[in-house]
Each structure stands twice: as C-alpha cells, then as structure tokens.
Amino acid sequence: MKTYPINHQAGNLRIGIVRARFTNEIGQELEKACLQRLQELGVSSDNITLATVPGALEIPVVLQQMILNGEYDAMIALGVVIRGETYHFELVSNESAAGIARVSLDYATPIANAVLTTENDEQAIARMHIKGKEAAEVAIECANLLYAIEEDA
C-alpha cells in the first residue's frame, strides 16, 4: 500500500491569502497567527501575497482572480462571521464556504478555509490564533500532497 507522508516543509511554496475585513480586529489576529506559522514553516515573506476584501462573501472571487493571475501553490481564506439576529449569518457562512470550495475544485488549488463561523465574539477570539496557525499548516500540507500525487502520475 502506498501512503503519502505529511509534509509541512514549505520550501519555495508560494501562498496567497485573502482576508475579510469585517470583524477586523479578530481577522487581523487570525492573519497574524497565520503569517507567523507560515514563516515558522519556512515560507519566505517574498512568497506570500495578501489581499483584503470587505467581507466573507467577497473572498471566493478574489481567490479565483489571484489564482488566475498568479503562481500560487496554495491559498488561504481568512475571515470571521459571527451569528447575529437574522438569517444573514447562515447565508454568509454557507455561501462563502461553498464559493471557496468551488474555486478550490475548479482550479485544482488547495485553499485552507479559515473563515470562522461562530455564535459570538468570545468563540471567535478563542479560535482565532489556533485557526490561523492551522490554516498555514493545511495550505502547505495540501500543496505538498498535490505535488507528490502529481509526481506519481
């Protein structure tokens, strides 16, 4: 049986990040944790591109355009959607996640989805550093896995 090892070695991987500015303070901390972990794993700051968008619904189209225009090995989506008193939470959460997944599949590019969807600010604050770091690890691991699978083809 062939198995692919988990590989978090960044090498020369190029990473694109799109972060929603809505709930900006939490999003900035999510971004900070993600960037710190990317650099810990060996991604050069020269190989990271960051774009910000107004909200989570705008993330997929910017991910798509960055993939079309750039040479990225993996992408990261960052944002925060906190439940309010209306149905808007479900709409934004579901549609942004579906859009991110569609772009990933349509362009065969791994996208680490770290758009937090929480009931309140406290839950978002509790998760922002962990999810930011995990997004960096997911992006690198999935980019390396796709390259390994491609090499076997």
Image: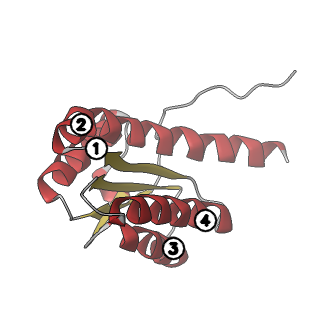
Q: Which residue is mark 3?
A: 64
Mark 4: secondary structure: helix
Taking the spot 34% from the left edge, 57% from the top edge, the residue there is 48
Q: Which residue is mark 4?
A: 102
What amino acid type should be assigned to the residue bearing mark 3?
A: Gln
* 10 Å crowding of disc 3: few (<14), some (14-19), many (20+): many
Q: Residue furthest top?
A: 1
Q: Which mark's residue is nearer the viewer, 4 or 1?
A: 1
Q: Is residue 31 left or right of residue 146?
A: left
Quarter of the picture containing the N terminus is: top right
Q: Which residue is mark 2?
A: 123
Q: Residue 59 or 73: which is nearer the viewer?
A: 59
Tell me, yes or no, whether the two marked residues, 4 and 3, touch with CB atoms within 8 Å: no
- Point out the tag, 4 or 1, that comes first from the N-terminus: 4
Q: Quadrant of residue 86?
A: bottom left
Q: Which residue is mark 1?
A: 119
